[in-house]
Amino acid sequence: MRLAAAYIKHLNIELLIWPLALGALYIMDPHGGGPSLCPLKWLGLNWCPGCGLGHAIHYLLHGDWAASWRNHPLGIFALCVLGWRTVNLAKQQIQIFYHLKKNPT
């Protein structure tokens, strides 16, 4: 029980957020017209440098490179950065859990 509590205490929340966000981008409907997640749109601004980035990542996850590029040219870069960050966080988390298992406190 103590080990499980230590695992939960040392769990990096960012490691949960990025895979969940990528999963949400995978299943979202880019043509759905749902509410915007853009804080600049919430402020009433019409221009945002990141507009289309979520749609670009969605299309990349589905293998549609051309549609991804049309929505935002930095979609490929953003997906690579998110993937790299997630892998590095997972490596760190595994090391932390290994250390906790060897030295339970």
Image (spheres, grey):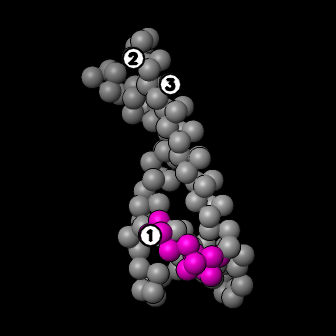
Q: Main secondary structure of the magenta part?
A: helix
Closer to the observer: label 2 or label 3? 3
Q: Earlier in the sequence, mark 1 or mark 2?
A: 1
Point 27% across, 23% down: residue: 1
| Vertical side of 2 occupied by 62: above or below | below
**What whole-number distance in Å separates the C-alpha atoms at marks 1 and 2?**
38 Å
Q: Which residue is mark 1?
A: 62
Q: Classify residue 90 as left or right of residue 85.
A: left
| Residue type for callout 2 | Lys
Q: Regarding mark 3 in the picture, which secondary structure is present there?
A: helix
Q: Which residue is mark 3?
A: 95
Closer to the observer: label 1 or label 2? 1
**What whole-number distance in Å separates the C-alpha atoms at marks 2 and 3?**
10 Å
In this view, the residue in front, 2 or 24, is 24
Q: Which residue is mark 2?
A: 101
Q: Position of residue 5 (x, y in %)?
A: 35, 28
In this view, the residue in front, 33 or 1, is 33
Tags 2 and 3 touching, CB below 8 Å:
no
Q: Position of residue 52 (x, y in %)?
A: 60, 78
- The answer to if 19 sits in the magenta stretch is no
Other-residue count near label 2 (Cα within 10 Å), few / some / many at <14 / 14–19 / ≥20 = some
Quadrant location, the C terminus: top left
